[in-house]
Structures are given as C-alpha cells and as structure tokens.
C-alpha cells in the first residue's frame, strides 16, 4: 500500500484538519449536521446559519448547486 501523497492531497489534508479543529473548538458546530439530518429540528437550529458566497442564507436548492460552496 502506498501511503505517500502529492502536494494537492497534502493541502487538502491540511484543510480538513483545520476544519476539524474549528468544529471541535466551537461547541455549536459540534451539533451541526447536513440538512437531511433533521438539524432544523434540533435545539441548536437558531444558532447556526448556512451562508452562500454572496452572503445570503442558503436555501434548499443551494445545497445542490456545486458552484455555491464556501467555508
């Protein structure tokens, strides 16, 4: 098994590590799930908003638009 990764894969790995750190640091993010995970019914729903790159709040159809991604 080859465990070596190229620079693109390494950059993605570092990005994902940072995302995990952020999620662990902020308790409200520990309870975030995808829209089909019934997050809207949780007690944390009012504390999190998913925002599009244009600054508007995401709508259902935005989740299916692969050009509409940001972190």
Image: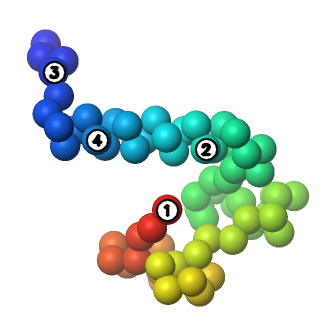
The residue wearing badge 1 is: 71
Mark closer to the chain start, 2 or 3: 3
Q: CA distance from mark 4 to mark 2?
A: 17 Å
Residue for badge 3: 4
**Residue hosting label 4:** 11
Distance between the alpha carbons at the discs numbered 3 and 1: 27 Å
In the structure shown, which secondary structural element does the residue marked by tag 3 occupy? loop
Foreground tag (3 vs 4): 4
Residue contact at pointers 2 and 1, CB within 8 angstroms: no
Disc 2 to disc 3: CB gap under 8 Å? no
Counting residues from the start of the chain, the first of labels 4 and 2 encountered is 4
Q: In the rendered view, does 64 fall on the left or right side of 21?
A: left
Mark 1: few/some/many CA within 10 Å (<14, 14-19, 20+): few
Q: Measuring from the top left, give residue 32's x and y in whole percent.
A: 67, 53
Secondary structure of residue under mark 1: loop
Whole-angstrom CA distance, mark 2 to mark 1, is 11 Å
Lower position in the chain sequence, tag 3 or tag 4: 3
Q: Is residue 70 left or right of residue 57?
A: left
Q: Is residue 44 above or below residue 55?
A: above
Residue at 52% over, 79% down: 52
Q: Front-most of 60 and 70?
A: 70
| Gap between marks 1 and 4 measured at Cα | 15 Å
Image quadrant in which the N terminus is located: top left
- Percent across and percent down for residue 24 are 66, 37
Label 3, label 4: how far apart the Cα atoms are: 13 Å
Q: Secondary structure at mark 2?
A: helix
Q: Is residue 25 above or below residue 37?
A: above
* C-alpha span from label 2 to label 3: 26 Å
| Residue 22: mark | 2
């Amino acid at each position: 098994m080859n465990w070596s990764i190229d620079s693109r894969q390494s950059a993605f790995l570092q990005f994902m590590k940072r995302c995990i750190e952020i999620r662990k640091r902020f308790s409200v993010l520990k309870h975030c799930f995808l829209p089909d995970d019934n997050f809207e019914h949780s007690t944390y729903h009012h504390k999190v908003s998913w925002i599009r790159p244009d600054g508007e709040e995401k709508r259902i159809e935005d989740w299916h638009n692969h050009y509409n991604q940001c972190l």
